[in-house]
Structure formats: structure tokens, C-alpha cells
Image (cartoon, rainbow, N blue to C red):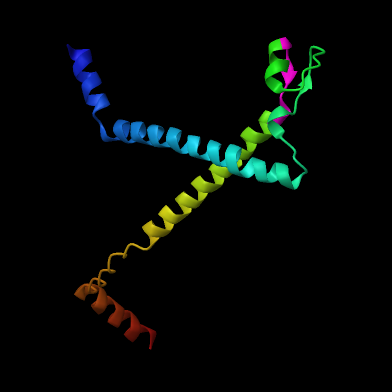
């Protein structure tokens, strides 16, 4: 029963729950970015470059003559560099968005009012007396 108790304590710690929520939200956010890149950004990039569709750019490694990536993959190995470009663009956009989010969070943390500085402690009387003796000896 000791192991179950330890597991329960571990699973109910705040950090574990925060991590679980972060992973779930991150997965959903990743799907949004995939859709943004695949459905909005890449068609615009393709239109700018004359109808270029990165998803079907590949180099056949097994001598395939297929025109689409799916057909070429069925026939053998392919180097799907167009798919890699799309995924790399997903990563860059996701990293930029996360960077902006962290930047905003850091700014919000800095804007919290700092505690007022404490008044300096009064100088002890013996130190004041020793300073006066020192100053009188200098003369």
C-alpha cells in the first residue's frame, strides 16, 4: 500500500497537474499552428511562388514515377523535403508565438510593484562615538 500512497502524493502535486494541463493545451495549440501554416500561410506562399505546393515536393529514392507524395510513398522510399519545409515553418511560427507569450509574461512580472525599501537602520551609538574620536584625532 506504501507505493500507492507515494504515487497518489506524486500525482496530486501541483507541478504534475500544471504539467498535464500544459501538455494538453500545448497539443491543442500545436494543432492550431498546424492549421494556420497548412491552411493559411502555405497557400499564400504557394500563390506568391506561382502555385507552388510544398506538400508534394519530394525526391524519389526507389525510382518511382508518381506525381504525388502519397503515391510515391506507396511505391517506395522518398525524400519528402516539401513536408519538412512545412513542418519547419510550423516550428518557427510556434517558437515565435511562444517567445512572444513569454515576453509578455516577463513584462507582467516586472510591472508588479516592488516592495518599498526599508529605512536604513540607525547607526549604533558606539559607532557614532568612535567616528567622533577618529575625526578629532585627525585634527
Q: Nearer the viewer, residue 113 or 43?
A: 43
Choose top left, top right, bottom left or bottom right for residue 76.
top right
Which quarter of the image is occupied by the N terminus? top left
Res 114 quadrant in image: bottom left
| Relative to 112, 61 lies left or right | right
Q: Which residues are magenta?
A: 75-82
What count of labels does the image hold?
0
Residue 50: percent from the left, percent from the top? Answer: 78, 43
Residue for point 46% across, 50% down: 101
Give the image location of residue 112, x and y in percent.
Answer: 33, 62
Please tell me whether residue 79 belongs to the stretch shown in magenta.
yes
Q: Is residue 14 above or below residue 70?
A: below
The quarter holding residue 94 reads: top right
Residue under the image location 72 percent in, 28 percent down: 56
Q: Is residue 14 magenta?
A: no
Rendered-image quadrant of the C terminus: bottom left
Q: Is residue 64 left or right of residue 44?
A: right
Residue toward you, 109 or 98 = 98
Of all residues, the one furthest to the bottom in this rendering is 139
For the point 32% across and 36% down, which residue is it? 18
Q: Position of residue 39 (x, y in %)?
A: 58, 39
Pinpoint residue 121: horizontal percent, then vertical percent.
Answer: 23, 71
Residue 8 in the figure: left or right of residue 51: left
| Rendered residue at 35%/31% (across/down) | 20
Amino acid at each position: 500500500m506504501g507505493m500507492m500512497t507515494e504515487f497518489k502524493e506524486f500525482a496530486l502535486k501541483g507541478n504534475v497537474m500544471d504539467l498535464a494541463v500544459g501538455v494538453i493545451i500545448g497539443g491543442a495549440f500545436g494543432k492550431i499552428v498546424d492549421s494556420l501554416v497548412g491552411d493559411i500561410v502555405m497557400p499564400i506562399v504557394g500563390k506568391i511562388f506561382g502555385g507552388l505546393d510544398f506538400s508534394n515536393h519530394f525526391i524519389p529514392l526507389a525510382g518511382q514515377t508518381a506525381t504525388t507524395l502519397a503515391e510515391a510513398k506507396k511505391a517506395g522510399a522518398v525524400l519528402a523535403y516539401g513536408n519538412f519545409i512545412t513542418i519547419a515553418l510550423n516550428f518557427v511560427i510556434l517558437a515565435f508565438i511562444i517567445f512572444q507569450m513569454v515576453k509578455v509574461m516577463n513584462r507582467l512580472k516586472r510591472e508588479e510593484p516592488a516592495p518599498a525599501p526599508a529605512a536604513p537602520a540607525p547607526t549604533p551609538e558606539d559607532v557614532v562615538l568612535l567616528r567622533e574620536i577618529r575625526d578629532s584625532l585627525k585634527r
